[in-house]
Image: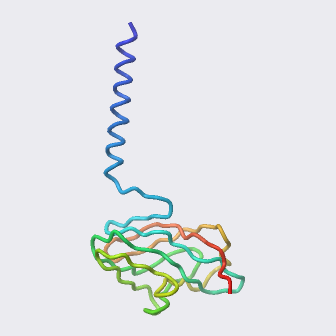
Amino acid sequence: MHHPIQRRRLLRHGLQAGVSLSLASLLPQARACEYFSPHLRITHPYTRATQPGETSIAVTMKFDEVTRADRLVGVQTPVAEGAEIGGLLARPTVDFMIPEGEETWLREDRSYLRLVGLKHPLQVARTYPMTLLFEHGGPVPATLNIDYARFL
């Protein structure tokens, strides 16, 4: 006489699994190295490994799926004393416009995020916490990945 109870339990678990899968399909699917604000996606924030004595480093990342124009206005990380924008739009503060509907990059051959006042060398394959601060999207916790050193 246990058959109706087991069948009911199996049906209930199957229904719960189906609802979970349905809800999961409605949410943005984050992959490794992707972070979301309410208005955009940030992909793969990374920098290169540093040598002892280096005091600054360029950080690269991509912004896309931008549904509302926003502005990167700050960065907090325990590996550096501060940050600024370097490259084409160089300025001593973090102030980087991210237009709606476009893919925008911070990268070494254009404008980039520069971490200044490094507190220690950044080693290959390490990761460090970083918080990106947006004018409209607020703070977004992310991870800074350390890639191979640049070869000269």
Residue at (34, 49) in percent of width and height: 25
Q: Quadrant of the C terminus?
A: bottom right
How are the colours assigned in the image?
rainbow
Q: Is residue 151 left or right of residue 27?
A: right
Residue at (45, 64) in percent of width and height: 34
Q: Front-most of 76 and 6?
A: 6
Could you tell me residue 128's position as x and y percent? 58, 68
Q: How many marks?
A: 0
Residue 96 to residue 125: above or below: below
Residue at (46, 58) in percent of width and height: 31
Q: Quadrant of the N terminus?
A: top left
Residue at (29, 74) in percent of width and height: 101
Residue 21 to residue 62: above or below: above
State which quadrant residue 51 falls in. bottom right
Could you tell me residue 36's position as x and y percent? 39, 65
Q: Is residue 58 left or right of residue 37?
A: right
Residue 25 to residue 82: above or below: above
State which quadrant residue 150 falls in. bottom right
Residue sticking out furthest to the right: 52
Residue 139 to residue 95: above or below: above
Could you tell me residue 33's position as x and y percent? 50, 64
Q: Front-most of 44 and 143?
A: 44
Residue sticking out furthest to the top: 1
Could you tell me residue 117's position as x and y percent? 60, 85
